[in-house]
Image: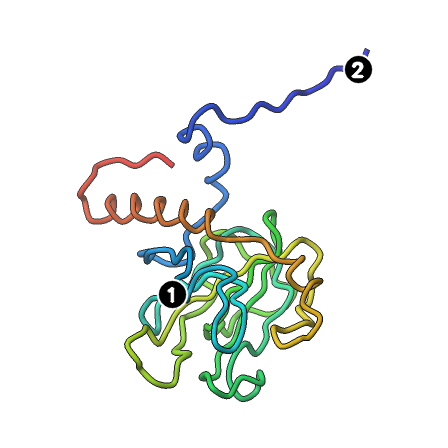
Amino acid sequence: MVKKTIKTEPKSWQEYNQRYMDIYHPPLLPMPDIPVASHHGAYMVKRRFDVHTGVDLFTCEGSDVFSIEEGEIVAIRKFTGNEAGTDFWENTMAIDIEGKTGTICYGEIEPSSSLKVGDTVKGGQFIGKVKRVLKEYKGKATSMLHVAIHRHGLKYLLKDQNDPDMESFYDLQLDPTMLLIQLKNKADLKMLKITGQIREVNY
């Protein structure tokens, strides 16, 4: 007789966090607010030059960037600027890391010089620093971490947002918004612990 293992869904938010969130690490510390809905940094918002396929985390230039989860570096590439075909933005790079969730893109950064394609990184490992991406200040933040998630198996991002056949490109996208909101909550608790405003944090 074959025994069947039945996986039960978490019964509470606390159980969900305990079961699933231990494998994830905030990409920034502290974490900024997460853009949603029609905000220009939110997922799938139509903007002047493109449709936004990630979430922008607005932060200071030079902020440390950490891997959200363990995975393999599958690409280190030019992301914005002249060399990437978007000369209306400053030159920045991106790292794509494939892990349990999919391939996570960390864009608009300067990657750590110690990293190369094929390396395995741990969750919470330093992978680079945020770079300025907007050339002019027009009332909006000029530096940010762009986070996008693509489905498993996407080794190289050969399509870009100017491709006329967009359906297959969008089919590869996963919405990172809820994960980032949960990671902000996790980061906020961590910062409270660091600053001594609370004595103990379990997560």
Label annotation for residue 2: 2
Residue 129 location (% of width, % of height): 41, 70
Q: Nearer the viewer, residue 78 or 170?
A: 170
Residue at horizontal 40 percent and vertical 76 percent from the top: 131
Residue at horizontal 47 percent and vertical 86 percent from the top: 88
Instruction: Please tell me how crowded label 2 is: few (under 14), some (14-19), or many (20+) other residues with Cα within 10 Å.
Output: few
Q: Quadrant of the C terminus?
A: top left
Label annotation for residue 64: 1
- Give the residue type that dot 2 points to: Val
Circle 1 sits in a helix, a strand or a loop, which is it?
strand
Residue 104 location (% of width, % of height): 56, 58
- Left or right: residue 13 compared with residue 116: left
Q: Quadrant of the N terminus?
A: top right
Residue 77 location (% of width, % of height): 59, 75
- Give the residue type that dot 1 points to: Asp
Q: Nearer the viewer, residue 7 or 193?
A: 7
